[in-house]
Image (tube, rainbow, N blue to C red):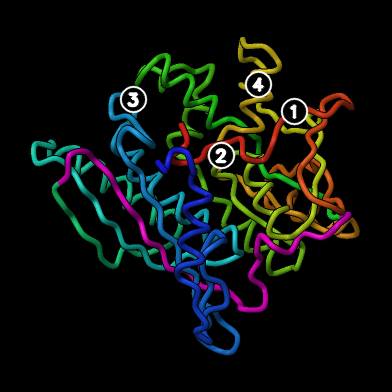
Amino acid sequence: MKIKKLGEDHIIDKIRETFRTGHPRIIKSIGDDTSVTAITEKRCLLLTIDSLIEGVHFKKDYTPPYYIGRKAVSISVSDIAAMGGTPLFLLTAISMPEDTDFELVEELYRGIKDSIADYGIHLVGGNTSKAESLSITTTLVGEADKHKVVYRSGAKPEDVIYITGTTGDSALGLEILSEEGIAALENVSYREAVLKHLNPVARVGMARALAEKGLAHAMIDVSDGLVRDLGHITEQSNVGAIIECERLPLSQEMLDYPRNRDHKLWLALTGGEDYELLFTSPPEKKDAVELLARRLNIRVTPIGIVTEGKGTKVLDRGEELAIDTSQGYQHFVS
């Protein structure tokens, strides 16, 4: 059977079955934003790896190489953040055709340099290779308090579901870039959405504070789309969820976008690569969550609740939408 018939989740499940391990230091292997490995009685190591591949994750005709470098760092940092950890050390593997202009390589590494400076992490090694197209793979090492790591599997019935920032902006930015090309960077009407796609910012401080204060039962970063990533939480926590479209935090650029409401909701619910935090928290922690959000000046919005049972219900004006948690971005599915 062709892998496009199976999808990314099936492949990951097969890998997990093949590489089951009983090593005593492994706390969490495959199946969360990072692996978690004990290094001392109190501390643990977080490991993650991501790739950006030309023609899959970006097109060079509308993606400046500087932003490829920045985004490559941020998406891995976002994984560490989603576990409540601190990012530390980065390795990169860059592959490119032999006729690539050296100026492109310089700009890509300038983006990496500026991004790691923003996050306070260090590049400690990597690899370069000849290839048919441009790609960059980032491996990031982080650490956390072993007893305060936040997994996808901790959501409990009656938890409130929160999301940081706004949802769907990266997908909106991609639509604008696809229509206007590189000129979209000069389109002041959608500049923030375009930059959200090209240059996402990981919510490290917010995530770490949620973990340290014990405010999040479960957490994930929104990379594949809100409903799909919420599905990862509900599946691994063995719970259900209800979210309400009227509560979704939409940016002014999304509200002003001249497409119908259904299309905007589709972007908000299934558009990936926002790299916002999606987390669940007990209702009695509501005041503490809101206080933290105000202190860090980060928008945090309650969009639903965790329920008994399984599956995610998406309500729009009181009526359930026909949408499932597999909707969102998934590799190998056309």
**Quadrant assignment, res 156:** bottom right
Q: CA distance from mark 2 to mark 4?
A: 15 Å
Q: Earlier in the sequence, mark 2 or mark 4?
A: 4
Task: Name the residue carrying label 1.
Answer: 322
Task: Name the residue carrying label 3.
Answer: 62
11 relative position to 159: left or right: left
Q: Is residue 221 or residue 156 the one in the foreground?
A: 156
Q: CA distance from mark 1 to mark 3?
A: 34 Å
Image coordinates for residue 107, horizontal then vertical, percent: 24, 41
Image coordinates for residue 60, horizontal then vertical, percent: 28, 29
47 relative position to 130: left or right: right
2 relative position to 34: left or right: left
Q: Dot 4, crowdedness within 10 Å: few (<14), some or many (≥20)?
A: many
> In the image, which is nearer the foreground, mark 1 or mark 3?
1
- Three-letter amino acid code at the position of disc 4: Lys
Tell me, for residue 274, which label it has, or none: 2
- Three-letter amino acid code at the position of disc 2: Asp
